[in-house]
Image (spheres, grey):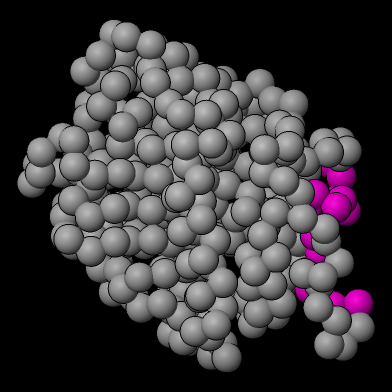
Amino acid sequence: MLTEKDKHDFDSDGIICLRGVLTAAEITKLTTCVDRQLSERATSATGYDFEDIARQIWTSDDQIEVESATRFDLEQMRRNVRSDRQARPLVEDAFEPEEGCFFYDVAAWQHDHGVREVAFDSALPALISELIDAKYLNFWEDTTFVKAPRSRQKTAFHQDLAYFQIAGDQCVIVWIPLDPADTQNGVGEYVRGSHKWDEIYAPNVFISQTPFIDSEEKRCPDIEAHRDQYDIVSFDVMPGDVIIHHVLTIHGAGGNMSDRWRRAMSFRYCGDRVRYFDRPGAIPQVGVTGDLENGDRLFSSDYPMVWPKPWPDVILAQLYLDQAPTARGSQKSRTNA
């Protein structure tokens, strides 16, 4: 499925778009999961509306109200953003403030068999292993990103590595559109070649380029304010297509200025040269045992090995039992946003 041009482009640009990688049935499995996450947002411990959080951070001094999510310290996030002299709202000007939703959730693979089937048993693991020349491949995590119609909130440009508890850059993120996506409804934008800048940048809070307070890495450049200085690329995509970017590639997204949904899920895969590293400022993971020490290979049930398969035709998704999302714990972490 991969061509030599694909490999060359990924090496030089840090980003490629591949067409028709996933089947309609696989997209349906992911869409079913995302729609359920949206419908259960009121009781989710991990689902957030970052558009609503951003409004409260910028316009209210009252306690930030979310439904049931507990993963982030939102009061610390507000203090951090408001004390940052470079911070500013990152929103489209087209719509009224109350219209949209920027929904975020994580770790569906732990409780959704369909997500596991796509992450573990689709064409993706073999394709990614070939792309990054991995002797074996571990699945790190999945994340859901939804921008409802008329959502003003942009996604701040950022680099992914420092969000993860890993050392080494043999890691990719696969962005999977579940609806047709383009620049009008918030498809991702990527700074071509930024994976070769030889820099690790601090994670930010998505709604602002304010770095996480505990991160030891430097602040990401303000790409949004100086777009003309960078080679920014995007791809119009359909369900079944995938966009794959290097863990060091800087990327962001606009708001959804259309009347169409933009649902998407991303998968993160790590190759054999990646090691565990409890990085200061990394986002705490949910539902993991925390049984690894710094420098360990990712040999843990927290990070399933998805390539090569132990024997032909095995369905790896069937080897893992569902966890109830309300029962998932959090990894020990020093992270504050």
Q: 43 or 184: which is nearer to us?
A: 43
- Depicted 74 relative to depicted 139: above or below: above
Q: 255 or 196: which is nearer to us?
A: 255
- Depicted 49 relative to depicted 332: above or below: below
Q: Residue furthest right?
A: 311
Left or right for 201, reference 334: left
Q: 147 or 243: which is nearer to us?
A: 147
- Spot occupied by residue 39 in the image (x, y as percentages of width and height): 45, 50
Residue stretch rendered in magenta on the structure: 295-310
Q: Main secondary structure of the magenta part?
A: loop
Residue 192, picture quadrant: bottom left
- Spot occupied by residue 147 in the image (x, y as percentages of width and height): 32, 52
- Depicted 1 relative to depicted 166: above or below: below
Residue at the (38%, 17%) spot, across then down = 64
Residue at the (43%, 61%) spot, across then down = 264
Left or right for 123, reference 15: right
Using the rendered image of the protein, determine whether residue 226 is visible from the camera's viewpoint: no
- Quadrant for the N terminus, please: bottom right
Q: 100 or 15: which is nearer to us?
A: 100
Residue at the (83%, 38%) spot, across then down = 289
Using the rendered image of the protein, determine whether residue 312 is visible from the camera's viewpoint: yes
Residue at the (76%, 61%) spot, across then down = 138
